[in-house]
Image: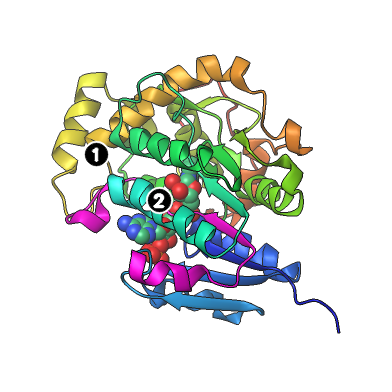
């Protein structure tokens, strides 16, 4: 009788990265178990073969977590949030640190050796100024001090067909009446394709020898936020005058918008974006373990964004008029 395929638990597998990873893993014959607080979030994934969904509002609490990971060989933690909400279970401390602690304990208790955590760029800054990055850094420290065969990945902003990045700008640009005010326009980052992130995770799953290493996953080019929005505007043929807001207004926008029930931008997001600016400059030298170490050549942003945004254009398939990094102004 042939051995059953390994079972991989995806904590936070209902999200953007989880959905793409689950599709690739089930296609590769792995058995997948997605942990979620709400099964409605994974309704579309039910069609995948060899996929099991475990849903409970308190799935990461000590009473349930051991059962949730039992029988698995690999545990991947994709839980993360950019914003905090009301209540203990929606604070960064719980979302990033508390859940990581409980997952590590559950993995150790149920004999799982192989643990992968998706963190974020900026956690190695000497003193992370954003609460998001600081909590991600504390979670990383827990992983790195565990006795498991762990791997950490720190992606830059990830884009793809159903992301919360390109698609958010598409929506905002559509509503903007000619002029598009942009917070933190000069923040720099190296956008990374979802396919490349999934490839990196698949490599780490298949090659446990690559473990006890932290991988920086950033795209091959550095873009400012203004350049990125400009490119998106051109790709969807929604020309707008992009007006970069001064730093103090960006700060004020964060302070005001974070009072909304579902804030699009918060002061902590502002601090995270500012941290990315610093990162891009020292990131060039710190890129020791990354795609290269995993044998992956990451995609160029413009080609792939153009492909993902094809359905968002009013007419025509071309990328004419799209500006490369370094060009700003009227999109
Ligand atoms: N997307 C990016 O650009 C990017 C860049 C750098 C790093 N990352 C990191 O990569 C990981 C995956 O990102 P993603 O884009 O897939 O995120 P996502 O779409 O927001 O999904 C993350 C998942 O985390 C779970 N979650 C969020 N808050 C939670 C809480 N308080 N308690 C329990 N579960 C919670 C949610 O699952 P349920 O609601 O179903 O329970 C959600 O589906 C995250 O750790 C993120 O920080 C992402």
| Res 286 visible | yes
Q: Residue furthest right?
A: 1
Report the disc number at residue 145.
none
Q: In which quarter of the image is the N terminus?
A: bottom right
Label 2 or label 1, whichever lies nearer to me, is: 2
Disc 1 residue crowd, few under 14, some 14–19, many 20+, Cα 10 Å: many
Question: Observer-nearest residue: 149 or 309?
Answer: 149
Residue 61 image position (x, y, % from top left): 33, 64
Q: Is mark 1 on a helix, strand or loop?
A: loop
Q: Is mark 2 on a helix, strand or loop?
A: helix
Residue 54 image position (x, y, % from top left): 46, 76
Quadrant assignment, res 259: top left
Report the disc number at residue 101.
2
The residue singled out by tag 1 in the image is: 266
Give the quadrant of ligand 1.
Answer: bottom left
Magenta-highlighted residues: 62-91
Position of 98 relative to 191 (above/below):
below
| Res 162 visible | no
**How many angstroms separate mark 2 from mark 1 (CA)?**
26 Å
Question: Observer-nearest residue: 52 or 237?
Answer: 52
The residue positioned 55% from the left and 80% from the top of the image is 46
Residue 19 image position (x, y, % from top left): 55, 63
């Amino acid at each position: 009788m042939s051995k059953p395929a390994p079972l991989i638990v995806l904590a936070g597998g209902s999200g953007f990265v989880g959905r793409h990873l689950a599709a690739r893993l089930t296609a590769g014959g792995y058995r997948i178990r997605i942990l979620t607080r709400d099964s409605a979030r994974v309704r579309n994934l039910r069609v995948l073969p060899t996929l099991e969904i475990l849903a409970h509002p308190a799935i990461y609490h000590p009473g349930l977590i051991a059962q949730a990971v039992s029988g698995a060989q690999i545990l991947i933690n994709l839980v993360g949030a950019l914003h905090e909400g009301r209540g203990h279970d929606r604070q960064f401390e719980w979302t990033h640190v508390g859940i990581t602690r409980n997952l590590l304990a559950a993995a150790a208790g149920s004999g799982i050796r192989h643990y992968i955590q998706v963190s974020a760029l900026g956690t190695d800054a000497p003193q992370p100024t954003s609460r998001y990055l600081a909590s991600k850094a504390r979670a990383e420290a827990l992983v790195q001090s565990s006795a498991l065969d762990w791997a950490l990945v720190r992606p830059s902003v990830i884009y793809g067909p159903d992301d919360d990045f390109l698609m958010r700008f598409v929506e905002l640009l559509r509503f903007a009446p000619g002029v598009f005010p942009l917070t933190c326009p000069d923040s720099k980052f190296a956008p990374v394709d979802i396919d490349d992130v999934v490839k990196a995770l698949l490599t780490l799953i298949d090659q446990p020898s690559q473990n006890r290493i932290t991988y920086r996953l950033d795209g091959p080019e550095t873009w400012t936020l203004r350049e990125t929005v400009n490119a998106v505007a051109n790709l969807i043929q929604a020309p707008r005058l992009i007006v970069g807001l001064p730093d103090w207004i960006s700060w004020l926008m964060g302070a005001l918008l974070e009072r909304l029930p579902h804030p699009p931008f918060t002061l902590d997001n502002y601090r995270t974006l500012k941290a990315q600016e610093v990162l891009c400059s020292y990131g060039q030298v710190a890129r020791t373990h990354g795609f290269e170490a995993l044998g992956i050549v990451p995609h160029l942003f413009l080609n792939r964004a153009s492909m993902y945004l094809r359905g968002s254009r009013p007419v025509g398939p071309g990328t004419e008029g799209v500006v490369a990094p370094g060009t700003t102004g009227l999109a």
